[in-house]
Image (cartoon, grey):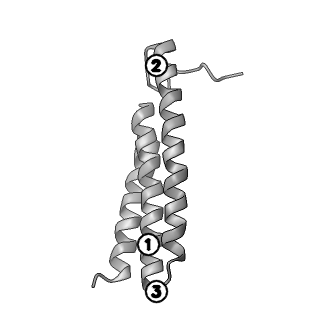
Amino acid sequence: MIPASWSLLLSAVVFTIGVIGVLVRRNAIVIFMSVELMLNSGNLAFVAFARQLNSLDGQVFVFFVMTVAAAEVAVGLAIIVNLFRLRESVFVDEINLLKG
């Protein structure tokens, strides 16, 4: 059996990689993937706690988070593709289309 502390440590490492990816990169697709890494690290923490407490509540919550994340991916990628068609760039520094 894998201890819950190892799963939580892995979750923290993956979340840190996601935060660094959001803060350092300027490519919209890489930022989008970094946000997905952060969501998955949260899911891993939920599963680790659910397993430690012998409860299915965390795993059910992860199922709903994955459902919302899938919808977010569909909408987010559609927005990125439309921005690329309009501006021919996916760098967030060059995209000022959404400014008011």
Q: Nearer the viewer, residue 6 or 25?
A: 6
Q: What amino acid is found at the position of numbered circle 1 in the picture?
A: Val
Q: CA distance from mark 2 to mark 1?
A: 36 Å
Among numbered discs 3 and 1, the one appearing first in the sequence: 1
| Circle 3 SS class | loop
Residue 54 in picture, x, y percent from top left = 46, 86
Q: State if disc 1 and disc 2 touch (CB < 8 Å).
A: no
Residue 40 lies, in percent from the top left, at: 43, 58
Say which amino acid is labelled 3: Asn
Task: Kindly identify which numbered label has been placed on residue 47.
Answer: 1
The answer to which quarter of the image holds residue 16 is bottom left
Vertical arrangement, residue 72 with respect to residue 7, above or below: above
Quadrant location of the C terminus in the rendered image: top right
Q: x, y (%) of residue 37?
A: 41, 52
Any mark on residue 54, and which? 3
Label 3, label 2: how many angstroms apart (C-alpha)?
46 Å
Label 3, residues with CA under 10 Å away: few <14, some 14-19, many ≥20: few
- Identify the residue under disc 2: 84
User: As shown in the figure, which amino acid type bears the numbered disc 2?
Assistant: Phe
Q: Is residue 26 visible?
A: no
Residue 22, percent from left and from top: 46, 43
